[in-house]
Image (cartoon, helix red, strand yellow):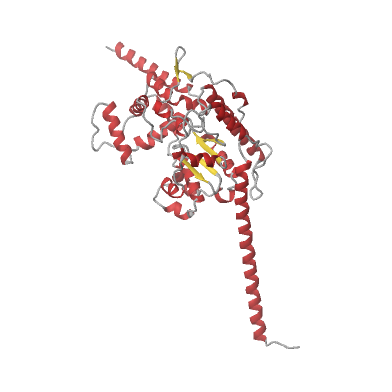
């Protein structure tokens, strides 16, 4: 038997160990690639598989639904009428019956499918509650759309959608409703490095639009047939107040600083001081919004009503998420699209405040403070603009009448105290 010298044996042992390490590395890489392929396949399958149930059978009524009414007070009602600039003919869904038919053809039951991915553990109880909420929101929305006879009446605003065909999602970006957070998710899907996203001074919107250009109307229609489409909504007046505080009150952006100066000049009747950091009051801002609406102008995206901005009565959104259940709803959307590996737990805790653009003071807690600045007449005018959003997404606007009434009572008491002291 040929005996190898000792040094040769040692060399062979080292080479064998290297080969074993290489084999292990190749095996690990193969497993990783298989997981990625599996996630991609899940996303493709889910595009066709998951669509929220839409019960439009109840809405097969004649087209003579009552126009939109909302209760201004116990004695008066005001009819809903969007600005004429928004009522452009919708070439794809100009016929209500045809539009309803397209919705019926897209119905798919979610109850027979599971969104649980074997890689992650997900509570079936949470899943069932989320699924029930999503179905209920859509059913409620279409009931309100039908009641107001506006199904298919507004042309979809394709310009504001983000479409990732490769991941099977189409998102209508509602500003001031967790938009920055989902922009961060989109930038991850776009291939940006996580460390780069955390340190860059570029805004998430700027980065996202480089990879996801603004789609045409035809692009949008095509993508909706093969994507999970969704939007995230927020209590209308909380969103409006958030926009005011971020764009007008803080006044850091040159464009909004200039707009704020124009509002002050118009509604306060005086030229703003050069070094005055304060912009328009909340009352002045609302007066501007009302005047702009009555003139038929288009709103700024940060305070445009959602019924106009995302036209949910003209698009069969798969899912309607809410700020109040944002974390749960976002995870549900991510799982529906099969993007768990790519997106779950990818927002670093140290950056949550910056990424989500959350204010130090919770907007909801400031509602009374700001809305107590206005009177009943201004509230009536501003509700004419946003009441449909309250109705579509099942929010209650009645508390604002109480806030304004408290202000009115306080003003009366102050006037009586003043008169009695004369």
For the C terminus, the quadrant is top left
Residue 373 percent coordinates (x, y): 37, 24
318 vs 19, nearest the viewer: 318
Asked where in the image residue 48 lies, by quadrant, the reply is top right
Look at the picture and state if 407 lies above or below 213. above
370 vs 264, nearest the viewer: 264
Asked where in the image residue 21 lies, by quadrant, the reply is bottom right
Q: Furthest residue to the right? A: 1
Residue 85 percent coordinates (x, y): 39, 28
Residue lying at 41% horizontally and 20% vertically, measured from the top left: 380
Q: Judge whether residue 339 can be spotted in this image.
A: yes
Report how many numbered discs are placed on residues in the image.
0
Look at the picture and state if 164 lies above or below 52. below
Residue 75 percent coordinates (x, y): 45, 11
Residue lying at 31% horizontally and 41% vertically, measured from the top left: 254
For the N terminus, the quadrant is bottom right
Q: Is residue 308 left or right of residue 331?
A: left
Q: Is residue 131 left or right of residue 369?
A: right
Q: Judge whether residue 278 can be spotted in this image.
A: no
Asked where in the image residue 330 lies, by quadrant, the reply is top right
Residue 93 percent coordinates (x, y): 52, 31
């Amino acid at each position: 038997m040929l005996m190898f010298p000792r040094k040769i044996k040692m060399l062979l042992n080292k080479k064998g160990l290297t080969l074993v390490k290489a084999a292990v590395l190749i095996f690990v890489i193969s497993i990783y690639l298989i997981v990625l392929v599996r996630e991609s396949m899940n996303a493709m399958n889910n595009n066709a598989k998951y669509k929220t149930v839409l019960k439009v059978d109840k809405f097969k009524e004649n087209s003579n639904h009552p126009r939109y009414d909302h209760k201004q007070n116990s004695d008066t009602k005001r009819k809903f009428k969007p600005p004429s600039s928004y009522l452009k003919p919708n070439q794809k869904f100009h016929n209500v019956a045809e539009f309803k038919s397209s919705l019926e053809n897209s119905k798919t039951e979610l109850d027979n499918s599971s969104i649980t991915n074997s890689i992650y553990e997900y509570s079936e109880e949470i899943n069932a509650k989320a699924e029930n909420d999503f179905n209920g929101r859509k059913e409620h929305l279409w009931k309100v759309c039908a009641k107001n006879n506006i199904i298919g009446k507004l042309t979809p605003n394709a310009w504001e959608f983000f479409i990732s065909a490769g991941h099977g999602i189409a998102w209508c970006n509602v500003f001031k409703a967790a938009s920055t957070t989902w922009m961060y998710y989109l930038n991850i899907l776009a291939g940006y490095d996580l460390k780069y996203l955390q340190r860059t001074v570029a805004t998430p919107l700027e980065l996202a639009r480089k990879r996801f250009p603004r789609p045409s109307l035809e692009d949008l229609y095509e993508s909706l047939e093969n994507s999970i489409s969704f939007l995230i909504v927020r209590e209308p007046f909380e969103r409006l107040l958030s926009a005011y505080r971020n764009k007008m009150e803080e006044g850091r952006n040159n464009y909004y600083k200039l707009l704020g100066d124009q509002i002050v000049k118009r509604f306060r009747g005086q030229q703003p001081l050069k070094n005055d950091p304060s912009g328009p009051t909340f009352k002045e801002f609302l007066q501007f919004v009302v005047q702009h609406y009555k003139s038929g102008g288009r709103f700024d995206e940060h305070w445009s009503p959602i019924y106009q901005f995302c036209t949910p009565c003209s698009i069969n959104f798969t899912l309607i998420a809410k700020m109040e259940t944002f974390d749960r709803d976002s995870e549900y959307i991510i799982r529906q699209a099969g993007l768990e590996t790519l997106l779950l737990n990818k927002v670093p805790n140290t950056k949550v405040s910056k990424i989500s653009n959350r204010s130090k003071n919770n907007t909801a807690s400031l509602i009374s403070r700001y809305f107590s600045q206005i009177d009943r007449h201004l509230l009536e005018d501003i509700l004419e603009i946003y009441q449909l959003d309250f109705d579509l997404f099942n929010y209650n606007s009645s508390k604002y009448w109480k806030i304004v009434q408290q202000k009115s009572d306080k003003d009366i008491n102050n006037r009586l105290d003043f008169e009695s002291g004369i």
